[in-house]
Image (cartoon, grey):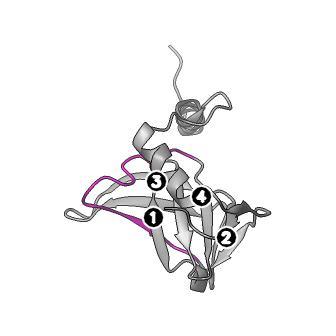
Amino acid sequence: MRRLTIASLATLAAAGTLASCATNGQPPARSAAAQQELSRWLDGRVVGRPQSCLPTFRNQDMTIIDESTILFRDGANRVWRNDVNGPCSGLGRPGTALVTRQTGSQLCRGEIAQVVDTSTGFIVGSCSLGDFVPYTGPRRR
C-alpha cells in the first residue's frame, strides 16, 4: 500500500484548485442584466490602455457588475474596469463586501480580493484582481 506524503497531498490539492478555476480561455457567461449594467456604464466611452495598478485616491466609488467584473469611478469622468481572475464567488450578493489588503497607496493586478459575508465575517469567495482598464468620456444614460 502506498502512502501519500504531505507534499503529495499539497500537490494534489493545488492541481484540483487550478482545475476548478480553468475556464478554457472563455470568460464566464454574463447575465443579460449584468451585460445591460456594464453597457450602461461603458457605452459611449473611449477605452484606454490597461494599467497594472490604480492609485487608491482614484477608486472612490466601486460598482459590482457581476462575479467577474468590478468598476471603479474616480470622479474625473473616468471609469476603471477590472475583470478579476476568478470568478469571485458571492461578489455582488446582498450582505457581502469586497475586501482587499493593499500595501501602499495602490490597488494592483494580482492582489487577492476576498468576498466577506458581512453578517458572519466569513470569507465566502476570493479572486485576484486583473488589469485596470480606463474608459473616459461622457456617460450615456
Residue highlighted by disc 4: 42
Q: Is residue 5 above or below residue 55?
A: above
**Label 3 sits on residue:** 65
Among numbered discs 3 and 4, the one appearing first in the sequence: 4
> Could you say which is closer to the camera, residue 136 or residue 1?
136
Instruction: Assess whether residue 87 is covered by the magenta stretch.
Output: yes
Q: Amino acid at mark 3?
A: Ile
Residue of label 1: 63
Crowdedness of circle 1 by 10 Å Cα count: few (<14), some, many (20+)?
A: some
Classify residue 116 as left or right of residue 15: left
Q: Which residue is mark 2?
A: 137
Label 2 to label 1, Cα distance in Å? 18 Å
* Image point (52%, 32%), residue name: 20
Q: Earlier in the sequence, mark 2 or mark 1?
A: 1
Residue 69 rendering spot, x and y as whole percentages: 53, 53
Image marks 1 and 3: residues in contact by CB distance under 8 Å = yes
